[in-house]
Amino acid sequence: MVQYKDGNIYMKVVYYGMGGSGKTTILKTLYQLTKDGKREIVPVSELQQIDRTSGATLYFDRGIFQSKKEKKIYYRVYTVAGQKSFSQLRTKVFNNLDAETDTVIFVVDSQTKFFEDNIEFLLELKNLTNDKLIKNIPFIIMLNKQDLKEVINDNDLIQILKQENLWYDPNHQLNRWNPLIYKTCALIDQEKDIYRSFYEAARRTGLYHIYGDGEAPIDKRFSDPSILTM
Ligand SMILES: Nc1nc2c(ncn2[C@@H]2O[C@H](COP(=O)(O)OP(=O)(O)O)[C@@H](O)[C@H]2O)c(=O)[nH]1
Ligand SMILES: [Mg+2]
């Protein structure tokens, strides 16, 4: 989070995941869904894209959005390049570009055949965040491409999250900050939960910073969805 002298606050949200999982498509769809200004969060500029001729994200995509109600709150939203060999670039986008990352939206390609590849990226992310996921960095997961056949479901992933200590038991105080898992489709004509997942990421970012001083707030009041609307 960066706060400027004029009081404007910039939150950094990163879509992370394997190449081809749909990150760029998600950001474009989010832009399309919000640009008419009828939602709580609106884009304040065109999307910036740095593509290869093949269409793959070379470096990153970026969009800047603003909360309509809290006009001083902006979201700088990035996607990372998903090619395996670009691990260093991902680290840079994650840690150095504009600021440290406040919130991660992990994008899974739900096709069963990519299960292992997704896990590899999840482990890379865990490593990159030094165990700050959930505790300091709100964590949202999108099981994208749910419109396709032979896709994984929540439980397949939750099993891995448990193994990796990224899923807390019901009696743990961080349990209610376990990652929200959305089954999404990013294609604009069949779009599902693209705005909702982003909105929830934005809301959690606000809760961690405003009520938790950069950590998951443990007071029960703050898990009530009505407590903070952005
Ligand atoms: N069927 C389907 N295809 C998708 C979905 N999201 C993205 N795609 C397609 O998957 C391919 C890779 O998407 P892209 O956004 O470039 O992935 P990125 O590498 O994560 O940025 C493109 O052909 C997209 O049209 C989805 O929800 N369903
Ligand atoms: Mg991309």
Image: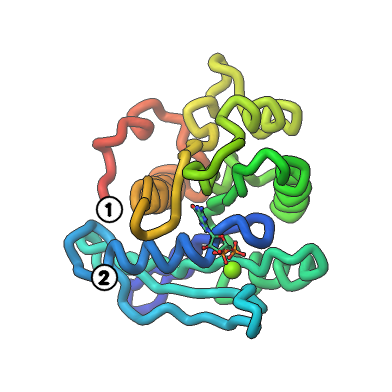
User: In the rendered view, would you say 177 is above or below 116?
Assistant: above
Q: Name the residue type under label 1.
A: Met
**Direction from residue 172 to residue 87 in the image, left or right:** right
- Depth check: give the residue in front, 190 or 12: 190
From the viewer's perspective, is 216 left or right of 227? right
Q: Residue drawn at (64%, 32%), measured in percent from left and top?
A: 157
Considering every residue shown, the one lying at the far left of the view is: 38
Return the mark for residue 230.
1
Q: How packed is label 2: few (under 14 Cα within 10 Å), some, or many (20 or more)? A: some
Choose between 205 and 142: the one closer to the eye: 142
Q: Is residue 52 above or below residue 153?
A: below
Q: Position of residue 80 (x, y in %)?
A: 63, 67
Q: Counting other residues with Cα less than 10 Å from the Cα at mark 1, is it few (<14), some (14-19), or many (20 or more)?
A: some
Choose between 140 and 152: the one closer to the eye. Answer: 152
Q: Amino acid at mark 2?
A: Lys
Q: Residue at x 51, y 50 (%)?
A: 214
Q: Which residue is mark 2?
A: 35
